[in-house]
Image (spheres, helix red, strand yellow):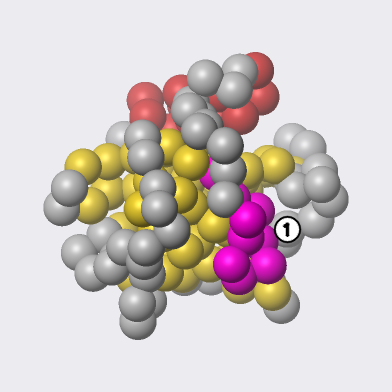
Amino acid sequence: MKLAELLLVLGLVTSPALVHAHGLAEPKYGGIVQEVKEVQYELTHKNGIVTIYVSDHDGKKTPTAGMSGTLIVMNNAEKVEIPLQPGKDNDLIAQGPATVKSGSKIGAILKGPKGNAQVRFTIK
């Protein structure tokens, strides 16, 4: 797991190679959308709570039951890792508060029954 985290952090800092986009959909939840391997991830943050919504390439909700992961929030030299757990529908919720602000770089290492994914976001 540590090697995967290192690769994600290096990717956040140096390269857009972790994200393969096909023309991103409009946000449905007021967040930032990224697409990886035909799956769309929308990150929202409100009152210190980070949520990632998952849908397929066509925008259909993808259930997150059985998924888990780690959220990595980078603010300058500060790096915080927070576990992600499934919510009620197509969402993964950070299990702790996160400081998300303009310039934050956020990565997620996701594990699920249909495979694993890494996705990154930059807060503008």
Residue 61 in sight here:
yes
Q: Position of residue 68 (x, y in %)?
A: 30, 58
**Residue situated furthest front in the rendering:** 58
Compared with 1, 113 (above or below) is below
**Residue situated in front as seen by the camera: 2 or 56:** 56
Q: How many residues crowd around disc 1 within 10 Å: few (fewer than 14), some, or many (20 or more)?
A: many
Local SS, label 1: loop
Residue 10 in sight here:
no
Compared with 13, 62 (above or below) is below
Which residue is at a point 45% across and 49% down the rendered structure image? 40
Give the magenta-colored segment's residue range.
Answer: 26-34
Q: Quadrant of residue 91?
A: bottom left
Q: Position of residue 124 (x, y in %)?
A: 82, 47
Q: Is residue 58 magenta?
A: no
Which residue is at a point 36% across and 35% down the rendered structure image? 37
Amino acid type of the residue that numbered disc 1 sits on in the rendered structure: Val
Q: Position of residue 66 (x, y in %)?
A: 20, 64
Which residue is at a point 61% across and 29% down the rendered structure image? 12
**Residue situated in front as seen by the camera: 26 or 47:** 26
Label 1: which residue?
100
**Residue situated furthest left in the rendering:** 113
Prevailing secondary structure of the magenta residues: loop
Q: Position of residue 87 (x, y in %)?
A: 37, 76
| Placement of the N terminus among the 4 image quadrants | top left
Q: Is residue 31 magenta?
A: yes
Compared with 91, 105 (above or below) is above
Which residue is at a point 27% across and 48% down the rendered structure image? 111
